Image (cartoon, rainbow, N blue to C red):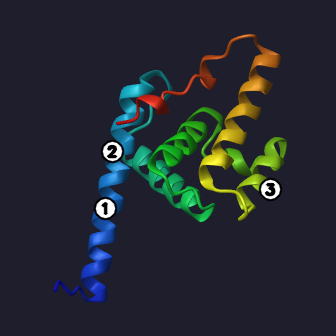
Amino acid sequence: MLSLNEQQLTACQQHNMNHFRDKMIQFLRSSHPDQIFNIVDEQLQQYVQSGIINAMQYHIKMEQDICRYLEYSLFYGWDFERSPSTSWITELLMNHHINGTTKMDKIELSMESHSNARMHTNDHTKHSYSQYP
């Protein structure tokens, strides 16, 4: 039987987090080069790391949902859920009775309808998370 001590478990969790963060950075760079061409690697790494942690604090746990959260962060600002104009998002994200996928679906539908109401088409709402590996 394999047994890990707390230090080994923490190291494994950190390794997995770093791997996922790097995968998300690669995904965002390849999927949205125009939006992040001027963000240096270290800064993007910090943004993505913070975004993953924020998503997990909102009980968004599925990789594809975290990816959507990061895409919204990229398009609408890295603290989009705290903006006064989107206070409804904070309420939704803080609701522990709704799972992460449902939260992201509701945000997506609302953002798309607001964007389409202002501009009949908006490239910022065309997410590529469905192409996420």
Element at label 1: helix
Instruction: Residue 128: give x, y in percent of width and height.
Output: 48, 27
Q: Residues within 10 Å of mark 2 (few under 14, many from 20)?
A: some
Check contact, mark 1 vs mark 2: CB within 8 A.
no
Alpha carbons under labels 1 and 2: distance apart: 10 Å
Between 56 and 106, the one nearer to me in the picture: 106
> Which residue in the protein does label 3 denote?
91
Relative to residue 90, is residue 73 drawn left or right? left
Sooner in the amino-acid sequence: mark 1 or mark 2: 1
Residue under the image location 81 percent in, 17 percent down: 118
Image quarter for residue 37? top left
Q: Quadrant of the C terminus?
A: top left
Given the image, on which type of amino acid does mark 3 rest?
Answer: Glu
Question: Taking the image as drawn, is residue 79 in sight?
Answer: no
Sooner in the amino-acid sequence: mark 3 or mark 1: 1
Q: Is residue 114 above or below residue 121?
A: below
Residue under the image location 66 percent in, 16 percent down: 122
Instruction: Residue 13: give x, y in percent of width and height.
Output: 33, 70
Sooner in the amino-acid sequence: mark 3 or mark 2: 2
Q: Quadrant of the N terminus?
A: bottom left
Relative to residue 43, is residue 106 drawn left or right? right
Q: Is residue 58 above or below residue 6?
A: above
**Total numbered labels:** 3
Element at label 2: helix
Image quarter for residue 39? top left
Alpha carbons under labels 3 and 1: distance apart: 29 Å
Given the image, on which type of amino acid does mark 2 rest?
Answer: Lys
